Amino acid sequence: MKNPHDPSHGCPIALASTARGRWPGPQRLLLGFVLLAGTPTVWAAPAARSAPAAQPHPRPSAQPFAPLPEGDPLAALWNDPHFQRRLLGDFAFRPSTEPALTVEEQRRWREEVVPLLRDNPTNAIPALRKAIRPDGSAVFDFTLGVIYFQQGDLTNAITLFETAVAKYPDYQRAWKQLGMARVRSGDYAAAIVPLGRALELGGMDAGLLGMLGFAHLNAGRPVAAAAALQQALLLRPDDFNLQLQLLQAWVASAQYDPALRLLGELIEQHPERANLWRLKASVLIQRNQLEDALVAYEMLRRTGGATAEDLFALGDLQVTTGAPELAVASYREAMEQAPEPGAERALRAAEVMVAQGRTAEATALVQAVRERAGRLPRDLQGRLNRLEAKLALAAGDLDRALQQLEAWLATDPLDGEALLLAGDGYARKGDRERAEFRYQAAEQLDEVAPDALVKHAQLLVRHREYRRAAELLQRAQKLKPREAVQRYLEQVLKLAAESGVSS
């Protein structure tokens, strides 16, 4: 058994050896194991006192190492050219952190594995599988893991990297690749230890620190993420992706002041970047600086990079801050980008406007939904019809409101809110019989029964039928106790006692 920590163990290729089959310390040769475009290639130095051996220089490939699609949260960091160069670049063999090979393993590596690696790494898989032994060198496990990693087989890659570091605990590159593979698999918490170990063995590396920060952030540890990313920025202070990651870590840990300061610097350098304005608006909302957030969203809009969600958020802010007339335009623009989800957001905003008494703006927004939403799902169609009826009732157009409600109830007789609105309309019109009919129908529906009973009771009070009204209010309180309803019930009971009316 070889001692993996013996410093006399060095190069995997032996062109000269001692009688013991090991490299003599003064004559140890170093192997440069390089990953060019994910393709492992071996350069062997000549043995001492021997003529230099001619070695074909590998042709680098332009293919990146296991690239991620745009839109993936890790893509900006992983696909960054600088990070790819570090990932694929020359990982020079280091005697203190690289496992050794026996003479037989060196022969197998040189004659059976290296030629296949240079041709096509996939072709080397059978040879590497055959070379792997429980007590063998970790080099074979690691190399096969790299090939699987590039192919996207993360399960086998992780298993092989784990085996490599178990065989040789100081294998820096294996720890690094294990951490990277776990990040790619989404197991962020499990990636933290191997990435940290790789840093311990290999010194400060901005790319590794950035990946460690990403893992901490996605594992729910934003404070640790910020610490790692700040160290990474000491080495690469102008790296935009690292700066964005740090911003996210600060925001996630509620460190809004430094986040806003860094955002100010970045926006000054890149005022055209929509994502910076978006993040600034989000931070300002967290700080309840809504007016400033409005300005940030307007600047985002001017960059031309505002998404439908950005425009919805802008519209929501405009409603919240008392500018619903501006919100209508924002929602219209949002619905042009996303008609169906836009309809739901716009209807929600219109409901808020109705509650605020801003019926003109709500009417304009409802009309925009009618014009742009096309064929709505049934639940949204019901909300739209009810909103239009509410607006007609608010405008005093009882006939139009009731016509809309009855048409809708003919298709959906169990729409509780529509039944209540119809009852209100008939009550205002003085049609007690139809009002009671609609309220009684609503009383059979659990979700609106408490409100239906109260509205029915109010109708009876207007007709001085206090005892019947009190009975309905008592039923409502059993279903949904409310202080305001209890006070109203007590007043009705008092009126019933004073009037002496029994009904």
Image (cartoon, rainbow, N blue to C red):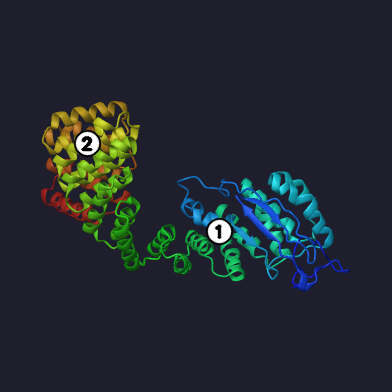
Helix, strand or loop at mark 2: helix
Amino acid on which disc 2 is placed:
Val
Q: Position of residue 338 (x, y in %)?
A: 33, 37
- Indicate which disc, 1 or 2, sits on the residue closer to the N terminus: 1
Q: CA distance from mark 1 to mark 2?
A: 55 Å
Q: Is residue 436 visible?
A: no
What mark, if any, has residue 2 been given in the picture? none
Instruction: Please state if 60 lies on the left or on the right of 373 as rendered.
Output: right
Instruction: Please state if 233 lies on the left or on the right of 489 as rendered.
Output: right
Q: Nearer the viewer, mark 1 or mark 2?
A: 1
Task: Looking at the picture, tell me which residue is in the foreground, 414 or 108.
Answer: 108
Q: Is residue 247 above or below residue 148?
A: below
Helix, strand or loop at mark 1: helix
Residue under circle 2?
366
Mark 1 burial class by Cα count in 10 Å: few <14, some 14-19, many 20+ = some
Q: Position of residue 142 (x, y in %)?
A: 69, 57
Amino acid on which disc 1 is placed:
Arg
Q: Look at 54% across and 58% down and name the residue there.
A: 188
The quarter holding residue 325 reads top left
Q: Look at 59% across and 60% down and name the residue there.
A: 179
What mark, if any, has residue 86 been given in the picture? 1
Quadrant housing the N terminus: bottom right
Mark 2 burial class by Cα count in 10 Å: few <14, some 14-19, many 20+ = many
Q: Is residue 460 above or below residue 480?
A: above
Quadrant housing the C terminus: top left
